[in-house]
Amino acid sequence: MSIATAVTWIFNFVVTMSLPAMKEESGFGSRGMLSFYAAWNLIGFFLVLLYVLKFLTRPNVPMLTSIASYRRPKVHCRHQ
C-alpha cells in the first residue's frame, strides 16, 4: 500500500511540474494537454487489462464472480 501511495505522489508531482511547461512551450492549449494525459491513462488502462487477461484462463473466470451470498451487500428496495 505504501508503494502505491509513493507512486501516486511521484506521478502527481510529474503532472504538476509538466503542466505549466507544456502550456508555455507547446501550442496544445488546455484541451490538448488534458488529451495528452487522457491518452496516457487509456494506454495504461489497456496495458494493465491485457496483462490481467493474459493470465486469466476460462476455468478461472467463475472464480471472479463467485462471491458468497453472505459477503454481498444487502440492498433494501421496494418491489412494485
Image: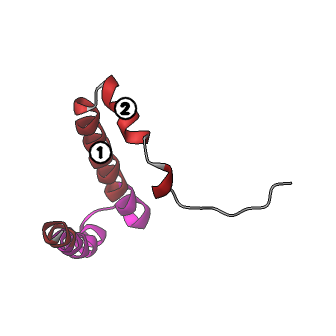
Examine the residues drawn in magenta and state their main secondary structure: helix
Mark 1–mark 2 Cα distance, whole angstroms, equals 24 Å
Identify the residue at image location x=24%, y=69%: 15
Residue at numbered disc 1: 43
Q: Is residue 28 visible?
A: no
The span picked out in magenta is: 9-35
Percent x, y for residue 77? 73, 62
Percent x, y for residue 79? 81, 55
Three-letter amino acid code of the residue under disc 2: Val
Q: Closer to the camera, 48 or 61? A: 61
Q: Residues within 10 Å of mark 2 (few under 14, many from 20)?
A: few
Whether the magenta-drawn stretch holds residue 28 is answered as yes
In this picture, residue 68 sits left or right of residue 75? left
Above or below for 61 versus 47: above
Q: Nearer the viewer, mark 1 or mark 2?
A: 2
Above or below for 79 versus 66: below
Q: Closer to the camera, 9 or 73? A: 73
Compare marks 1 and 2 and give the one earlier in the sequence. Answer: 1
Three-letter amino acid code of the residue under disc 1: Ile
Residue at numbered disc 2: 61
